[in-house]
Image (cartoon, rainbow, N blue to C red):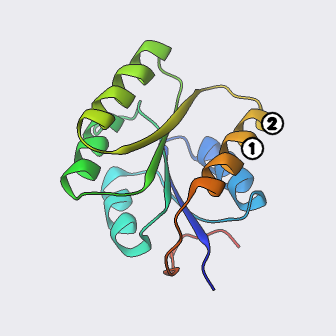
Amino acid sequence: MEEHRLLIIDDEADVASIVAEAAVACGFVVCKSHQPEEFKQIYGDFQPHVIVLDLGMPKTDGIELLSFLADIGSQAKIFIFSGLDPTMLRVAAGLGVARGLNMAGSLGKPVRLSELNKCLLALKEACDLSPVKDCPSALA
């Protein structure tokens, strides 16, 4: 059986959990990470269809992770979810497109759950499916 896989990277555990719960409710299999190095490992093992990426993180920011994803040729749909200025969200999305990434949109924090659900459902509809791989941090 094929399922939609979503990977979240956000240094705020509570925010990542809220996004994860919303994504599971929308029918995704979810992995989440709070650390960039862990994110890179999970990405390789999990092969997500969708990535929800926080731009503003300590040490390694979202722009560096966009570069990583471009360097490995990621085909995942990338959705930016960040509390940074909306101009930064647009700049990051533009950089992602310029690097050949499949930028799927963005939302600023804080966000209404109904708006997040609407975006997640649209992302799910747009996914190309491939076989599921296990995720050690998948939500039950």
Query: In this view of the protein, which residue sits in the foreground, 13 or 41?
Result: 41
Tag 1: amino acid: Asn
Q: Can residue 61 be seen?
A: no
Q: How many marks?
A: 2
Image side of residue 21 versus residue 69, left or right: right
> Residue 2, located in which quarter of the rendered image?
bottom right
Residue at the image position 44 percent from the left and 72 percent from the top: 46
Q: Are the two marked residues, 2 and 1, in contact with CB atoms closer than 8 angstroms?
A: yes
- Toward the left, the furthest residue is 71
Image: 32 above or below 115:
below
Q: Which residue is mark 2?
A: 114
Tag 2: amino acid: Ser
Between the residue at mark 2 and the residue at mark 1, the CA separation in whole angstroms equals 5 Å
Q: Which mark is residue 117?
A: 1
Residue 79 percent coordinates (x, y): 50, 41
Q: Can residue 43 be seen?
A: yes
Residue 132 percent coordinates (x, y): 53, 79
Residue at the image position 38 percent from the left and 64 percent from the top: 43
